[in-house]
């Protein structure tokens, strides 16, 4: 038996106590079944994981301009070189396709 299971304290003394104990046990069982159902819902788990990844990506995307500005302040040469490389690549590909 797991450490979280409860042992009955004593035998109920009246029918009302027995009914209350049965009702409490039913509620606990329903909560346990619901929790298990949620853990076994593959689509829900996948959606939750996808939402987490999407939130992380969104955070990173929002950081890009801030990080680029900080890099520009420290040393703009790499950004200028990357932009020039991109522009020259696009010009070359356009020229090659045009030929």
Image (cartoon, rainbow, N blue to C red):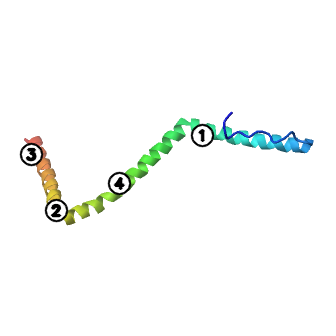
Q: Crowding at label 1, few (<14), some or many (≥20) Cα neighbours within 10 Å?
A: few
Q: Which residue is mark 1?
A: 38
Q: Earlier in the sequence, mark 2 or mark 1?
A: 1
**Image location of residue 7, percent across then percent down:** 76, 39
Q: Identify the residue position indicated by label 4 in the image.
A: 60
Q: Residues within 10 Å of mark 2 (few under 14, many from 20)?
A: few
Label 4: element kind: helix
Of labels 3 and 4, earlier in sequence is 4
Asked which secondary structure carries label 2, the reply is loop
Label of residue 76 in the image: 2
State yes or no: discs 4 and 1 in contact (Cβ < 8 Å).
Answer: no
**Which residue carries the number 3 mark?**
95
Residue at x-position 74% and y-position 40%: 6
Q: Does label 1 or label 3 sit earlier along the sequence?
A: 1
Query: Among all residues in the image, which is located at the extreme bottom?
Result: 73
At x 86%, y 42%, the residue is 19
Viewport quadrant of the N terminus = top right
In the image, is 47 to the left or to the right of 90?
right
Q: Residue furthest left?
A: 99
Q: CA distance from mark 4 to mark 1?
A: 30 Å
């Amino acid at each position: 038996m797991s450490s979280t299971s409860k042992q009955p304290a004593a035998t109920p003394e009246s029918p009302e106590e027995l009914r209350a104990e049965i009702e409490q046990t039913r509620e606990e069982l329903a909560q346990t079944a619901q929790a298990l159902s949620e853990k076994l819902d593959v689509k829900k788990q996948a959606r939750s994981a996808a939402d987490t990844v999407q939130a992380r990506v969104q955070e990173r995307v929002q950081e890009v301009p801030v990080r680029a500005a900080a890099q520009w302040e420290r040393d703009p040469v790499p950004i200028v070189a990357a932009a020039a490389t991109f522009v020259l690549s696009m010009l070359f590909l356009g020229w090659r396709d045009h030929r």
